[in-house]
Amino acid sequence: MAAKRYPGKIWALVKSRVLAIVLIFIISTAVTVDAFELMGRWVPSEVPQTGNIYRYWWFKALAVVLLVNLAACTTDRIIRQFKSKAGFLSRWGSVFFHAGLAVIIVGTLFTGSYRAHSTIKLVQGETKQIPYRALTAQEDFNRGSGPDVSFTLDKQEIKFNASGRIGEVFSHITITDHTGRDRSYDLAELEQFSYRGLYMFPDLYGYAVKIGIRSNPGETESITIPLETTEFSEGIRSYSQKNLKIASLPYNFSVNFYPDIAVGGDAVKSVNRSYQLENPGLFIMANNDNEIGAQQVIPLGGAVKLGGYTLTFEQVKPWTELSVVYDPGAGLVFAGIIMAIAGLSITLLSRPFPAVKGQNLKRSNNNE
Amino acid sequence: MSSAETQLTLLWLSVSFCFLATVCFFSALSFKKEKLENYGVTCSHIAILPMAAALALRWIETGHVPSIGTYEVFTIYAAGVLLFYNIIQYWKPSVTIAGTVVLPVVTLMTGIAVMSSTELTELPKTYFTYWLGIHMLFATLALGGVLVAAGLSIAYLIKGRQEARGRVNPLLKKLPDLDRLDYLGHRITLFAFLMIGIMIASGAVWAYKSWGRYWGWDPIETWSLISWLVYGLYLHLRLTGVKGKLASWLHIAVVLIVIFSFYGAPYLYPTIHDRFVNADSIYLQGSD
C-alpha cells in the first residue's frame, strides 16, 4: 500500500504550487544576488561574461526542476479541465501560460547547449570558404571539416544622406555550397536572412587596404588587411589595425586609414567623420625592437621606404561583416513567448480571476 | 521659438497641472472633500494634453520613438503612466484614489525630464526599428499598472487600518469594500505582470534581430527578469491564500523592486541600455 502511495505523493509534490513558489524564490534570489555582485565589474561589450550564475550546473538544474514542475502542473490542469464540467476559460489561459513557460525553458536549454555565434568578414570581391560544421559548432574542437560553404561579397553600396553621413549600407552577398546553386542576397545593415538553419545579418562594415611589399632583390607580394572599425558617437569612426605582423617583414605595424585626408603632413588624427573615399590616406607606423622604422602618411598609390623594403598603398576595398547565428532554441523560445502571452491575456480578459476563484467556485457548485 | 523650447514650455505647463492635481488629491484626503478629488482628476486630464504634444514634437524632431536619454525616457514614462491612469480612472472610477500615488510620481518624472538636457545625438542603427516603440509602449503600460496597483494597495492598507479603528475618511469610505479593493488591485497587478512580460519579450525579439541573441544577461535585462519573477512569486503566493493586508505589504515590496529596475539599475551599471539614461554614452555590441 505504501509503495502505491509514493508515486501519488511524488506527483502531488512535483505539480504543487508550493514547489513552484520555492523554485521561483530560489531562482529570483540567486539572480538578484548575481545582479548585485556584477554591479562593479560588468563590461557591456563582453556578453556573456564569466561569473554569471546561469553558467553553473546548479542553476541549470534549478531550471530543469522548474521545467518538470511546470510540465506536471500543466498536465494536471489539462486533465482537470477535461474532467471538469465547468471549464473556466481563465484556467485554459493558465494552462497555455504555464505550457508557454515550459516551452521557453526548453528553448533556453537548447540555446545554452547548441547556440553558436560567429562572424565572417568579407572583403569586396573576395570569397571565403568555411565548413558548414564550423558555423554550427559551439567549440573550436568540434569544428572539424565538412562540406564548405562559400561566401562572396560581390559589392558593397553606400547611400549617403543629405548631410553627407551614411544613410544605408547595402551588401550584395552570394552563398554557394556543395549543391552548386548560387544564392544571392541584397542586404541592408541588420537585415536578416536564413540559410540552412543559420540566421545571418550584416552587422558591421569598414575598409580593407591592400599593401604591396617589394624587397630589394625584386620580390613582390601583396597583402589585404581588413581594418577594425571603431564607432564613436556623432558618426565618428576610426579604421585601424594595431600590432600587425607580416611574415616576410621584420617589423610590427600599426596602420590607420582615412577615407578623406589632405595628405601632406604627418597624420595626427585617429578618427574621422567621412566614409566617402575622397582623398584616401594611410598612416603607417612600423617599429622593430622599440625603434621606429617608419611613420608616414601616404596617399593611394604612394609608397614608403622601410629598410630594404618598399611598401605601396595599392588599393582600398570595403568589407562587410556577416554575423552568423546557429540557435536551435530561439524558435522554441519565441513560440513559448507567444503561448505564454496568449495564455496570460486569456486569464486577464476572462473570469473568474484567482482572487475570487473560491467564491465563483462556490457559486458554480450551487448552480449545479 | 525652437522645437526644444516649445517642448519645455509644454512640459512646464504639464508639470504645473500634475502638481495641482497632486495638491488636490492630498487636500481631498486631508480635508475630506470629494470635490477636490474631482478637481485633481480634471487637472490630470488636462496635464496629458501638453505632455502628449511635447512628446509628439520630440518624435517628429528625432524621427524615432522618444526613448533616449533622461529627458525622453522620463517624458514618455510620465505620459504613459498618466494616460494609463486617466483611461483606467475613466473606465473604473473606483480606482480614482490611486491618483494620490500616481500623480506625485508623474510630477516628479516630468520635473526630472524638464531639468534634463534636450540635446539630440546620433543613434546606432539598432534603434531605428518599430520594436523600440513596442518595447517602450509596454514598459510605460507596465509602469502605469504597477503604480496604479501600488496606489490601490496603499489605499487598502489605510482603509483597513481606519476601519479597524472605526473612523474611516469619507473619501476612503466611498471606495469599494476591502475585498473588492483587494480584487481590483489583483487584476491590475495581473495586467502589470502581463505588460512586464511583453516588455521583456519584445526586448528579446529586438535583441535577437539586432545582435543575434535574445538574452544576454545584461544587468537591465536581468533586473526586468527579477521584477517579473517577484511578480510571479507574489501572484503564486496569492493563489495559496495570501490576501488582504499581507498581500498589500508584499505588493508594495514588489513595486519597490520594479521601480528600482526601472529607475535605479540603469544608473548603477554600464549596460547596453545606457542610452535610456545617458544620451551621450554608447555601447555597441560587435564593435570595438
Image (cartoon, grey):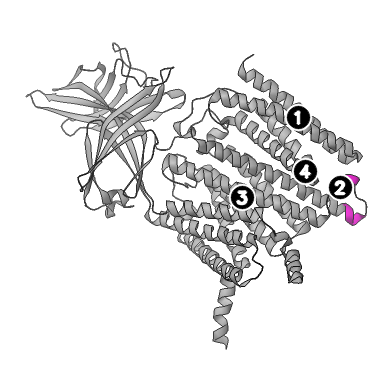
Which badge, 3 or 2, comes first in the chain's sequence? 2
Which badge, 3 or 4, comes first in the chain's sequence? 4
Name of the residue lying farthest toward the top: A264
The residue wearing badge 3 is B194
Q: Chain of mark 1?
A: B
The residue wearing badge 1 is B46
Q: Secondary structure at mark 2?
A: helix
Q: Secondary structure at mark 4?
A: helix
Which badge, 3 or 1, comes first in the chain's sequence? 1
Q: Chain of mark 4?
A: B
Marks 2 and 4 sit apart, C-alpha to C-alpha, by: 11 Å
Is there one chain holding both mark 3 and mark 2?
yes
Residue B112 against residue B216 in the figure, above or below: above
Marks 3 and 4 sit apart, C-alpha to C-alpha, by: 20 Å
**Which circle, 1 or 4, is nearer the viewer?**
1
Q: In the displayed structure, does residue B59 sit left or right of residue A271?
A: right
Q: How far across and how far down the image is residue B90, in percent? A: 76, 41
Magenta range: B162-172
Is there one chain holding both mark 3 and mark 4?
yes
Image point 68% across, 61% down: which residue?
B237
Residue A310 against residue A83 in the figure, above or below: above
Q: Amino acid at mark 4?
A: Ala
**Which circle, 1 or 2, is nearer the viewer?**
1
Question: Considering the image in quadrants, where does the N terminus of chain B appear?
Answer: top right
